[in-house]
């Protein structure tokens, strides 16, 4: 869009997204049936990204025939083809499935949020929004090192100091890692830190990982916090028992660092979205 659009001198420009050279700007498509919203979002983001505003899903797919953007900001409530139908089509066409889609919407009820997550949206921003919130969301998707995931607290519980050292070495560059070699002290540590994910050794002499799960789940802060088991016994019976108890996944020792990190990121991504849904529900209740 041209530079002669109406400017708002009171726009809140975040410090974390400095203007970049044109050659470095990431491409973002904004889809909204209201021109006013397109103008507003474009003006607020154009110093930091290359913005392509479009008024409908049909125009979006015409645009996508020419290039693949880094991210799509998508309104839900549009005539003819709404945001959910648009997202379905994006996810059903292989060449578009890798494009992160963030809903930018005024429909912030649980039903719509859950529907967005189930259909593959990576995040959602509710209207009206702060520039800081929108840019934090965009940067979280475009620059993985800035994601909320990387602020997550991981608590690893294992009676083997060498395993804990290996876990800390594999994860500390991405997460805040706490290690606990004495599982019987778990409750004491939970009074100090609030983990976003637990790594539990399956077999420990004083108390097993299985026995720790009910302790964790009885804590109101952790009734759905992801729990990954570290086990050298990856049999079907052990895996089934772990899932029955409420574990989210398991890692077989000796573990591959990349596999461990991928599983943790996958679990955290879903957990953080669900947590945001709960926070939003409280806000609108």
Image: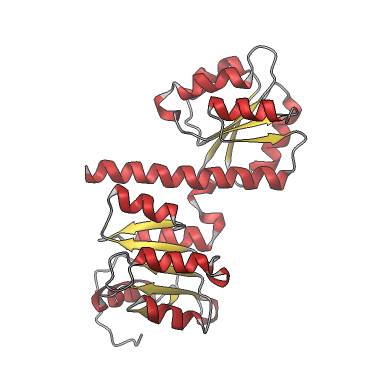
Residue 137 appears in the figure: yes
- Location of the N terminus by quadrant is bottom left
> Image point 51% across, 70% down: which residue?
70
- Location of the C terminus by quadrant is top left
Q: Quadrant of residue 281?
A: top left
Give whichever of 139, 62 is nearer the camera: 62
> Image point 74% across, 38% down: which residue?
255
Residue 15 appears in the figure: no
Q: Looking at the image, which residue sits at the far top?
A: 206
Q: In the figure, is residue 20 to the left or right of 234?
A: left
Q: Is residue 31 above or below residue 251?
A: below
Q: In the figure, is residue 55 to the left or right of 188?
A: left
Q: Is residue 216 above or below residue 115?
A: above
Give whichever of 266, 161 is nearer the camera: 266
Q: How many marks?
A: 0
Q: Looking at the image, which residue sits at the far left?
A: 285
Q: Position of residue 276 (x, y in %)?
A: 38, 46
Q: Position of residue 243 (x, y in %)?
A: 58, 30
What colour scheme governs how the chains and residues are painted in the rendered image of this protein?
secondary structure
Q: Position of residue 195 (x, y in %)?
A: 50, 33
Q: Is residue 66 above or below residue 118?
A: below
Q: Is residue 273 above or below residue 26?
A: above
């Amino acid at each position: 869009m041209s530079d002669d659009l109406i400017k708002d001198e009171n726009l809140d420009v975040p410090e974390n997204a400095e203007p970049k050279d044109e050659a470095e700007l990431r491409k973002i498509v904004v889809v909204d049936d209201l021109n006013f919203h397109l103008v507003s979002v474009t003006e607020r983001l154009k110093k930091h990204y290359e913005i392509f505003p479009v008024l409908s899903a049909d125009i979006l797919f015409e645009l996508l025939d020419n290039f693949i953007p880094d991210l799509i900001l998508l309104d839900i409530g549009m005539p003819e083809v709404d945001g959910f139908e648009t997202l379905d089509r994006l996810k059903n066409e292989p060449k578009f499935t890798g494009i992160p889609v963030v809903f930018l919407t005024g429909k912030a009820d649980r039903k719509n949020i859950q529907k967005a997550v189930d259909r593959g949206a990576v995040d959602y921003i509710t209207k009206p929004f702060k520039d800081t919130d929108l840019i934090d969301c965009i940067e979280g998707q475009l620059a993985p090192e800035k994601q909320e995931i990387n602020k997550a607290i991981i608590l690893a519980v294992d009676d083997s100091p060498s395993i804990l050292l290996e876990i800390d070495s594999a994860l500390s560059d991405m997460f805040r890692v706490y290690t606990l070699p004495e599982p019987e002290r778990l409750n004491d540590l939970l009074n100090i830190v609030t983990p976003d994910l637990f790594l539990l050794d399956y077999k420990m002499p004083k108390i097993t990982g299985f026995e720790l799960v009910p302790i964790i789940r009885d804590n109101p802060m952790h009734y759905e916090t992801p729990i990954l088991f570290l086990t050298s016994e990856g049999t079907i019976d052990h895996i089934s028992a772990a899932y029955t108890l409420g574990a989210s996944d398991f890692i077989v020792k000796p573990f591959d660092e990349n596999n461990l990190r991928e599983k943790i990121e996958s679990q955290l991504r879903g957990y953080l979205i669900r947590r945001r849904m709960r926070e939003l529900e409280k806000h609108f209740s």
